[in-house]
């Protein structure tokens, strides 16, 4: 999809602007995370420090900070503490994801489970979640505690649902959307809604930010799944094909199976029924993806959620934060990293 490359600089700038606007607070978020993950248990300390060095976009933390400021939060550090909490929930789910997927790399570096094994990785993920709940309790808001607790449960349900449908080549789009809504969009939604809770905004404001975050998260995940089959884009720290090799059924494969002919359908089914998939099989899938213009079709599907996300912010008065959050909807779809 050529427009992705042409728009790369402008789109990536929207994320850079968000990060630059909250640079000082993001430093505090990082310090908070380091403090909470510090442990006297040597292995635990070593593994969490390694995780921190792998970096990440911190987009969920930034969403919390931006939403809080959009709603007028200016005094105190609750936004920083809760942004750190959101990031720890995300990190814990990634650790558990990597174990389930038997992943070897993430962000261009070896995964925790690849270095220290599955058992240690699961326990470290649990440790992060425990620290999260400490932070929720320390915040003192029962409303926020309830939101983030239910979000953690949603993420787990999404993981189980994905596992339940693993290798299901004829998966319904509806099922796929339910999986990514629980696994990804729920935490985006919580991150943005938390910002409105810090200033006790009325229900319509909370609902607007919740809706914004949910649809942004859906767009973000669709884009991520699509990037994994887009051989025409050069990536930063990302190799294509991971979902295919792990046997994940995502939107590109769902749409491809819908359009494929009988022989191609049979091939796809054979590929995903196998315990392991090979490079030459991935190349065949890429040719089919190109033949049916699946990348474009995926982006067209995601544009619907972009519009929903952006339009939900119309309730807010014009401001720098509003502009940044609206621009981020385009970044979530057309990013290349």
Image (cartoon, rainbow, N blue to C red):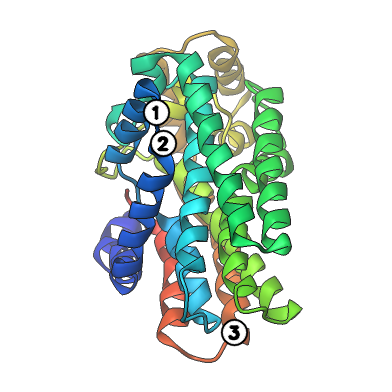
Q: Earlier in the sequence, mark 3 or mark 1?
A: 1
Question: Percent position (x, y) of residue 311?
Answer: 59, 77
Q: CA distance from mark 1 to mark 2?
A: 6 Å
- Give the image location of residue 201, x and y in percent: 67, 81
Q: Give 199 or 239, whichever is nearer the viewer.
A: 199
Are dots 1 and 2 in contact, CB under 8 Å? Answer: yes
Q: Position of residue 64 (x, y in %)?
A: 50, 65
Question: Relative to residue 282, is residue 31 depicted above or below?
Answer: below
Quick one: SS at disc 2? loop
Residue 270 found in image quarter: top right
The part of the image, by quadrant, that contains residue 217 is bottom right
Q: Is residue 165 left or right of residue 130?
A: right
> Which image quadrant is residue 260 in?
top right
Real-space CA distance between mark 3 and mark 1, rounded to the nearest whole angstrom: 38 Å
Q: Residue at x 65, y 43 (%)?
A: 152
The circle on residue 241 is 1
The residue under label 2 is 229
Figure check: 33 above or below 274: below
Q: Nearer the viewer, residue 45 or 320?
A: 45
Residue 294 can be seen, yes or no:
no
């Amino acid at each position: 999809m050529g427009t992705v490359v042409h728009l790369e600089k402008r789109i990536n700038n929207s994320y850079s602007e968000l990060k630059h606007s909250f640079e000082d607070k993001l430093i505090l978020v990082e310090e908070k995370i380091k403090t909470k993950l510090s442990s006297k248990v040597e292995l635990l300390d070593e593994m969490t420090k390694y995780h921190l060095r792998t970096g990440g976009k911190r987009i969920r933390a930034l969403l919390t900070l931006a939403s809080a400021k959009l709603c007028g939060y200016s005094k105190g550090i609750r936004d920083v503490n809760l942004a750190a909490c959101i990031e720890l929930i995300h990190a814990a789910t990634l650790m558990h994801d990597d174990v389930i997927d038997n992943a070897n790399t993430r962000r261009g570096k070896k995964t925790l489970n690849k270095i220290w094994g599955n058992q240690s990785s699961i326990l470290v993920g649990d440790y992060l979640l425990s620290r999260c709940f400490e932070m929720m309790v320390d915040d003192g808001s029962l409303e926020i505690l309830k939101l983030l607790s239910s979000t953690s449960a949603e993420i787990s349900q999404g993981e189980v649902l994905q596992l339940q449908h693993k290798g299901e080549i004829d998966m319904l789009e509806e099922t796929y959307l339910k999986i990514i809504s629980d696994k990804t969009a729920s935490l985006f939604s919580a991150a943005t809604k938390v910002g409105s809770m810090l200033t006790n905004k009325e229900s319509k404001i909370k609902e607007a930010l919740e809706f914004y975050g949910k649809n942004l998260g859906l767009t973000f995940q669709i884009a991520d799944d699509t990037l994994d089959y887009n051989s025409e884009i050069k990536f930063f720290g990302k190799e294509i094909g991971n979902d295919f090799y792990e046997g994940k059924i995502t939107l590109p494969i769902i749409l491809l199976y819908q359009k494929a002919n009988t022989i191609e359908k049979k091939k796809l089914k054979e590929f995903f029924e196998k315990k392991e998939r090979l490079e030459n099989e991935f190349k065949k899938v890429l040719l089919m993806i190109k033949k049916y213009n699946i990348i474009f079709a995926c982006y067209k599907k995601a544009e619907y959620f972009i519009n929903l996300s952006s339009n939900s912010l119309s309730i807010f008065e014009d401001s720098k934060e509003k502009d940044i959050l609206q621009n981020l909807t385009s970044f979530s779809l057309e990013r290349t990293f």
